[in-house]
Image (tube, helix red, strand yellow):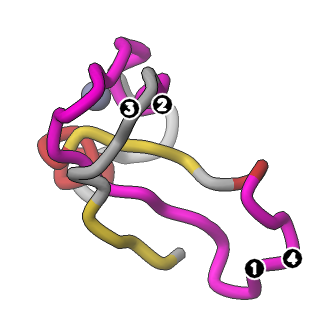
Amino acid sequence: MRTVPGAQATKDYRCPGCDHEIRPGTPHLVAWPADGTGGVADRRHWHKACWGARSRRRPGRW
Ligand SMILES: [Zn+2]
C-alpha cells in the first residue's frame, strides 16, 4: 500500500477504518495497492488515527 496526505480533499470520503465520513478539508491519508492496477477507484481514504490503529488490529478482533 502507498499513502499520501489528502489534506486537499474537496469531497466526502468513507473511512474504512471507522466507517465514518471524512469531511472536506479534514487531513487524512489516501492508500492504494502498491502495484496500482486498481486505478483511482481502488483508492481508500483513511483518517490518520484510523490508519495508525489499522496496523495494531489483529484479524478477527474488533
Ligand atoms: Zn476513520
Q: Residues within 10 Å of mark 1 (few under 14, many from 20)?
A: few
Query: Measuring 62% from the left and 54% from the top, which residue is drawn there?
Result: 43
Q: Please state the quadrant of the image where ligand 1 appears.
A: top left
Q: Is residue 36 magenta?
A: yes
* Residue 25 vertical placement versus 38 (above, below): above
In the rendered structure, which amino acid carries the disc numbered 3? Gly
Q: Residues within 10 Å of mark 2 (few under 14, many from 20)?
A: some
Between 37 and 8, which is closer to the camera in this rendering?
8
Q: Is residue 17 magenta?
A: yes
Mark 2 close to ligand 1, CB under 8 Å: yes
Q: Quadrant of the C terminus?
A: top left
Picture coordinates of residue 20 (x, y %)? Answer: 36, 12
> Residue under circle 4?
37
**Image marks 4 and 1: residues in contact by CB distance under 8 Å:** yes
Dot 3: element: loop
Q: Quadrant of residue 10?
A: top left
Query: Measuring 75% from the left and 87% from the top, which residue is drawn there?
Result: 35
Task: Write down the region rendered in magenta.
Answer: 13-40
Q: Is residue 31 left or right of residue 23?
A: right
> Residue under circle 3?
17
